[in-house]
Amino acid sequence: MARGGIRALIGLIGIGACLAGVAYAANQQQTTVAGRDRRAQSGPPKPTIDNRPDPRSPSTRARFSFTARRPGVRFECRLDGARWTACRTPVLVVGLAVGSHKFSVRAVDGRRRHGAAAKVRWTVLEAKDFEIVPDLSGLSSLYPGAPPVALPLTLRNPNQAPILVTGLRVAVAADPPGCAGADNLALVQSNASSSSPLEVAAGGSVRLPAHGVLPPTIRLRDLPVNQDTCKDARFPLEFTGSARG
C-alpha cells in the first residue's frame, strides 16, 4: 500500500494523467483481492430440510431429510440442546417427550468449516386414546349357520391432530353359563391395518364402515352338537384398537 502511494505521488509531479491511471489500477486490484478473501472465508451453504413433522403432532417419532446445494459436504445434526454430531439424511428421531422440540442441521466442508444451520421447531402433543363406541342396540339375534353380522362402531379422536387407526379387534369378555364363546362364536376382525389405515380427523369421529374399512363381524357357528345351552345367551364383547399419529 505504501509503495503504491509513492508511485501515485511521482505521477502527479510528472504527468497528471498517470496519477489517474495508477490510482484506478490500484483500487481495482484492492477490490479484487478483498473479494477473493471473502469467498475463501465463507463456509458451506445452509441446508434445505425437505421432510419434517407437522408443527403439532401426537407422534413421539420424527423423520427429517435434507440436502445441500454444494456437493461433497458432510452434515452435523442436533436435537434440542444436545451436541452437534455427524449425521446422514434421512434422520429418524424416536422416543420424543411431550412438549416443544427443535431439530438443527448444518453442512460441513473438507476444511471443517460449517455454514448456517437450518432449523425446525415443532410440538409433540400428549397422545390420548381414541374411543371405540359400539352401537349394538339394533342387532338381531344370532342363529346357527346364519350370515355374519357386522358390529356397528363409531371411532372418536380426542387428539388435536389426525390419527391413523391401524387395527380394530373384538373379543368375548366372558362366557355365559354352558355356552363357550370360543367354540360357538366366529369373530372376524376389522380390515384396518398398518398398510390400510383409517384416518380420523383431529377432534372428529368416523362411523364404520367408512373409506373401505369394515367393522368386525360376529356369527353363531352351526355345530354338529346340541347348542340349546346357547339359546338366549348374552355375550359381553370387548373392543380394542391401535392407531398412530
Image (cartoon, helix red, strand yellow):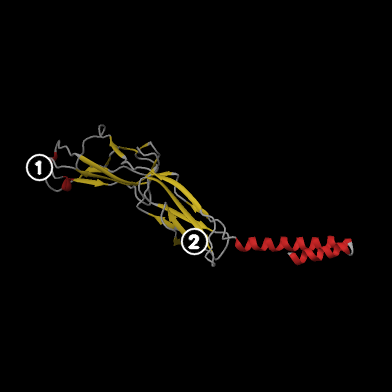
Q: Nearer the viewer, residue 192 or 90?
A: 90
Q: In this view of the protein, can residue 221 be seen by the observer? A: no
The furthest residue to the top: 137
Point 14% across, 42% down: residue: 175
Element type where label 1 sits in the image:
loop
Point 88% across, 61% down: residue: 16
Q: Position of residue 40 (x, y in %)?
A: 62, 64
Q: Nearer the viewer, residue 34 or 62?
A: 34
Element type where label 2 sits in the image:
strand
Left or right of 117 in this view: 1: right
Would you identify the image quadrant in which residue 199 lies? Answer: top left
Q: Nearer the viewer, residue 163 or 160?
A: 160
Label 2 or label 1, whichever comes before in sequence order: 2
Q: Amino acid at mark 2?
A: Phe
| Residue 75's disc number | 2
Left or right of 45 in this view: 62: left
Point 46% across, 47% down: residue: 121
| Residue 178's disc number | 1
- Is 229 located above or below residue 19 in the figure? above
Q: Amino acid at mark 1?
A: Gly
Q: Nearer the viewer, residue 42 or 199?
A: 42
Position of the N terminus, as image quadrant, is: bottom right
Crowd around label 1: few <14 · some 14–19 · many ≥20 (10 Å): few
Q: Position of residue 29 (x, y in %)?
A: 74, 63
| Residue 81's disc number | none
Crowd around label 2: few <14 · some 14–19 · many ≥20 (10 Å): many
Left or right of 207 in this view: 118: right
